[in-house]
Image (tube, rainbow, N blue to C red):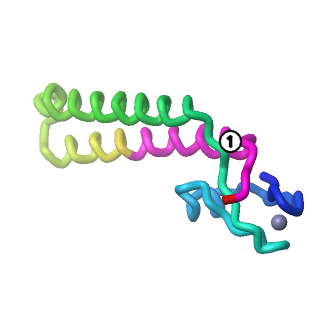
């Protein structure tokens, strides 16, 4: 990812990604404040993903509870589902955002 003012490149690492969920940054070189320019489609896909995730989580809660022998196993399955969904989203989201253009804010 590049600063729009001085063209300084930063590595869009997991640390940078995780500490800037809103996609807003301050350049270490020139102090410019800039943001990721996410296309509108990004938000559409994010909403779709969250709906899909919420839908499958609800399905697990309503229909999956009977499949598990204890509530502990059920909670574990639910947590695995939650972590897997978040991890898969973050994995693709970070790679995608690293390619996005930036603009001053
Ligand atoms: Zn800069």
Q: Position of residue 50 (x, y in %)?
A: 38, 36
Mark 1 sits on what residue? 95
User: What residue is rendered at 73% in x and 50% in y?
Assistant: 102
Q: Is residue 92 magenta?
A: yes
Query: As displayed, is residue 49 above or below residue 36?
Result: above
Dividing the image into four quarters, tell me where ligand 1 lies: bottom right
User: What residue is rendered at 17% in x and 34% in y?
Assistant: 61
Question: Residue 73 or 30: which is nearer the viewer?
Answer: 30
Query: As displayed, is residue 61 above or below residue 23?
Result: above
Question: Which SS class for mark 1?
Answer: helix
Quadrant housing residue 10: bottom right
User: What residue is rendered at 22% in x and 46% in y?
Assistant: 75
Question: Residue 18 or 2: which is nearer the viewer?
Answer: 2
Query: As displayed, is residue 80 above or below residue 1?
Result: above
Q: Position of residue 40 (x, y in %)?
A: 55, 33
From the Cβ of disc 1, is ligand 1 less than 8 Å away? no
The secondary structure that dominates the magenta segment is helix
The quadrant of the picture occupied by the C terminus is bottom right
Question: Residue 18 or 48: which is nearer the viewer?
Answer: 48
Quadrant housing residue 90: top right
Q: Is residue 50 left or right of residue 22?
A: left
Quadrant housing residue 39: top right
User: What residue is rendered at 88% in x and 57% in y?
Assistant: 7
Question: Residue 100 or 93: which is nearer the viewer?
Answer: 100
Residue at the front extreme of this rendering: 105
Q: Is residue 90 magenta?
A: yes
User: What stretch of residues is rendered in magenta?
Assistant: 83-104
Neighbour class for label 1 at 10 Å: few (<14), some, many (≥20)? some
Q: Position of residue 49 (x, y in %)?
A: 43, 32
């Amino acid at each position: 990812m590049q600063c729009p003012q001085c063209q300084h490149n930063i590595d869009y690492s997991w640390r940078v990604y995780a500490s800037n969920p809103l996609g807003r940054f301050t350049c270490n070189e020139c102090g410019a404040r800039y943001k990721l320019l996410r296309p509108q489609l990004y938000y559409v896909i994010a909403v779709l993903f969250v709906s899909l995730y919420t839908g499958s989580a609800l399905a697990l809660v309503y229909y999956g509870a009977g499949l598990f022998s204890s509530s502990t196993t059920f909670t574990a399955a639910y947590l695995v589902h939650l972590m897997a969904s978040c991890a898969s989203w973050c994995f693709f989201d970070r790679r995608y955002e690293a390619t996005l253009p930036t603009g001053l804010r």
